[in-house]
Image: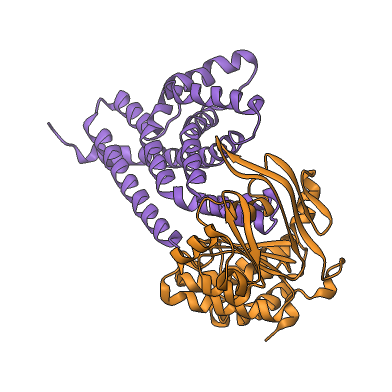
Amino acid sequence: MPTDTLPTPEQSPSAPSGELIRLEQVTKRFGDHTVLDRLDFSVDAGRHVTLIGPSGSGKTTILRLLMTLTKPDEGTITVAGRRLFPAPEKQVREVRKQIGMVFQQFNLFPNMSVLRNITEAPVTVLGMAKDEAEERARDLLELVGLADKRDARPTQLSGGQQQRVAIARALAMRPKVLLLDEVTSALDPELVAGVLDVLRDIARSTDITMLCVTHEMNFARDISDQVLMFDSGRVIESGPPEQIFGEPENDRTREFLSAVL
Amino acid sequence: MNWDWSAVSDFMPHFWDGLLVTLRILVLGSAISFVLGLVWALLMRVPSRWVTWPVGIVTEFVRNTPLLVQLFFLFYVLPEWGVTASALTTGVIGIGLHYSTYTMQVYRAGIEAVPAGQWEAATALNLPLRRTWTAVILPQAVRRVVPALGNYVISMLKDTPMLMAITVLEMLGEARLFSQETFRFTEPLTVIGVAFIVLSYLASLALRALERRLAH
């Protein structure tokens, strides 16, 4: 596997261990509804963290805040020691380079080939030479098992294939953090395994920090080293997957798990 | 009704002249309306009222007043302010401007139809705003609106005779001139009527071919 195309700890200026993401006193409201209420939350570098909890509990909102797709009403967000919010636009762009995201609906660019979906940002944002970007894109496509699809259009691919391209596209930017937002929820059941295999591979073979929201409890158990149980915008329980899934302490966690497992 | 084939052949040289002028109006007018309509649509998205209000008022005004009035205004009033251009140039600008206020709405709908997820993916990849527009949003928006833009080209074709009112000799102008000189009305008017049908039909064929090519 071409692991050299993936981020390694040597590339991060900060130490691979230690805190990478910090949310402090973050409040997010949608109208009258407060999704996150003065949330404090941090993730150490290299961790694979899964956020679980009932829908509407604020899990996806955290990913969207980190990707700057939405802004908090109050609080601060810091990534690798630099402020992401509040921060001037130029700094936001710099800090955001360290974060990649894979979406529930893939969101590939339908007007571009698979290869260009992957090379577009490295070339225009990182200023990478086109040849180099294409070579790396080919390696990444191999990693996700789609080397033969480089010239296809996204619409010619199955949902599972599109999602694997989307993963390759996010990795092409060499992010330190990969945000995974319900990445298998829109897939037909038989296509889920292929996507999870790829993510499991990446989780095992790289030091990339993963923050994932999922309803796939098996996947959460399999790749994460930390599970956070959310309810009403708060972390009500956290711990290694064996503990959360094996012997949850909180009643709400137990209730939730018995409903989804 | 008497039909005189010799009148038809007498009219044909004038007809070809008129056809060329009609096609020039159509091609240049469409080009102006496509570009200007996109400019209006993009300006309407600038997050400042100092931009959107004037653009909104001007385009609303142009869209809701008759093309003929606008053509007269451009042709007879602007020269009084020292702005002069040939009748054809004035007419092309007039019809292009008029239709740009329609294509603007087409573009707006096309831009709004691009899913929010495309913007979010562009943000997640840190693409600059400009690049997001040119590489992601506009290619998808324009592809969506080609059929609607094409329909406006066909509408515009049917509005080209309006330019006769400002002395442009397009097909109808040539036919009318011919009629005034020869007192034959049936033949020239029939010829240009057929020509309009043929042009509309060819345009719709070209449009359908283009739509097929643009399908993902």
Question: Which residue is nearer to you in this view: B6 or A105?
Answer: A105
Question: Residue A196 falls in which quadrant of the image?
Answer: bottom right
Chain B takes which shade in the image?
Answer: purple
**Quick one: quadrant of the N terminus of chain A?**
bottom right
Position of residue B48 in the picture relative to residue A132 (left or right)? left
Q: Please provide percent x and percent y for residue A247.
A: 57, 71
Q: Nearer the viewer, residue B116 or A31?
A: A31
Seen from this angle, which residue lies furthest bottom?
A1
Q: Is residue A23 visible?
A: yes
> Does residue A138 sit above or below B39 in this rendering?
below
Q: Where is residue B83 in the image (x, y as percent from the top left)?
A: 63, 20
Would you say residue A152 is visible in this rendering?
Answer: no
Q: Residue at x 45, y 51 (%)?
A: B144
Chain assigned orange = A
Give the percent coordinates (x, y) of residue A22.
76, 55
Residue at the (56%, 68%) spot, across then down: A113
All told, the count of numbered labels is 0
Image-based side of A137 in relation to A207, left or right = left
Q: In the figure, A217 relative to B117: above or below?
A: below
Instruction: Please provide percent x and percent y for residue B149.
Output: 44, 44
Please tell me which residue is depicted at 51% across the width and 17% down the height of the picture. Answer: B73
